[in-house]
Image: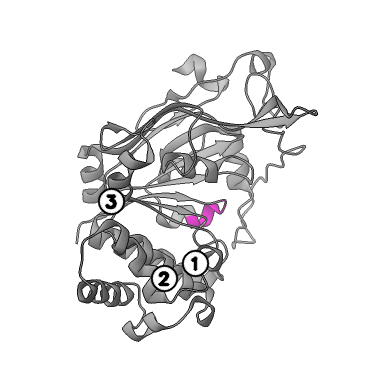
Amino acid sequence: MATVEEKKMTQTEQESIVKVENLKKYFPIKGGILKRTIGHVKAVDGVTFDIKQGETLGIVGESGSGKSTLGRVILKLLDSTEGNIFFEDQDITKLNNKKMRPIRRDMQIVFQDPFASLNTKMSIEQLIEEPLLIQTDLSKDERKEKVNSLLKVVGLRPSDRLKYPHEFSGGQRQRISIARALAINPKFVIADEAVSALDVSIQAQVLNLMADLQEEFGLTYLFISHDLSVVKHISDRVGVMYLGRLVEIAPKKAIYEEPLHPYTQALLSSIPDTDVDREREVIKLEGDLPSPSNPPSGCAFRTRCPMAHERCAVERPELIHKGDGHYVACHLYDDEA
């Protein structure tokens, strides 16, 4: 088994499997008798990053920061407003459904609520077999063998294939969702709040399962969550989103030990500490998250930032490299670049 250091070196040498450049997703706001567009909700507002083959990139942020929309746009479950999406160096941004179909087998998603994402009228066998019917030419016996194999991989019994979603616990249903996502041997999987609806003990089991499957099948993950502790457990790099924008992205250790952006610092200070004797500063953010339909000018975080100054109101900060793969979008660091 490769050591952590060896794994990091391998990831550095690997080509990016996914790249997004200046990605935007605006939802129109309709008003008036004629339902004309009177504004836009800027759910994703100019996001750029890449994901290396075999790594896990965690995306964190408050509810309403655009994390889930970002994942759906990358998979083209939603069309982008602007920007480019590359998968294995192929620009898939403008591909229609017919051209996307052979690519979709390499890109899958695990949703937050396993019960809502599984058709309750279908058996587990039918649910896992469905993508095999659509994307492969396997015979009936081969499909059955594949279903049994996948159930074993995620820690369930082959006999469970005859049951229905309501007969399983939340953690078991999420395992079924993972088996379904792996059915056609994808290369890239988006986990959208995949463990947030589960009990803490079950979360750990599912996270460990995902880590084992990543190593076994060479998967690449985009792991979306609002829980910083969960992201720390599974990610290699972490990106922090605020109001549709990426404000910081860096290797996991740098984010958790040396956060640069005031928003990242505030998020990390809110994580409960089990050491009651250790003194630590808790950064309290004033005010509510601004509306993505009317974001603040300049830096979107400036209305809640304790270190904001005049420049923040007029100029939007861009991501700048601070070394060792650590990028931050904050005017506090412009002069140091």
Q: Element at badge 3? A: loop
Q: How is the image coloured?
A: one colour
Q: Is residue 248 above or below residue 143?
A: above
Looking at the image, residue 303 sits to the left or right of residue 104; the answer is: right
From mark 2 to mark 3, how far is it between C-alphas? 18 Å
Identify residue type, mark 2. Answer: Ile
Tell me which residue sits at (29%, 54%) in the image: 186
Rate crowding at label 1 as few (under 14), some (14 to 19) or many (20 or more) other CA atoms within 10 Å: many
Tell me which residue sits at (73%, 29%) in the image: 35
Identify the mark nearer the N-term, 1 or 2.
1
Residue 122 location in percent, x, y? Answer: 46, 73
Q: Name the residue beneath numbered marker 1.
A: 118
Q: Name the residue beneath numbered marker 2.
A: 176
Identify the mark nearer the N-term, 2 or 3.
2
Mark number for residue 187? 3
Q: Element at badge 2? A: helix
Looking at the image, residue 135 sits to the left or right of residue 65; the answer is: left
Looking at the image, residue 266 sits to the left or right of residue 169; the answer is: right
Verify whether residue 228 appears in magenta.
Answer: yes
In the picture, residue 149 is in which quadrant?
A: bottom left
Who is closer to the viewer here, 154 or 251? Answer: 154
Residue 311 location in percent, x, y? Answer: 64, 13
Residue 161 location in percent, x, y? Answer: 37, 80
* Extent of the magenta region: 226-230
Q: Are marks 1 and 2 in contact (CB under 8 Å)?
A: yes
Q: Element at badge 1? A: loop
Rate crowding at label 2 as few (under 14), some (14 to 19) or many (20 or more) other CA atoms within 10 Å: many
Identify residue type, mark 3. Answer: Lys
Identify residue type, mark 1. Answer: Leu
Q: Quadrant of the N terminus?
A: bottom left
From mark 3 to mark 1, how far is it between C-alphas? 22 Å
**Mark in front: 1 vs 2:** 1
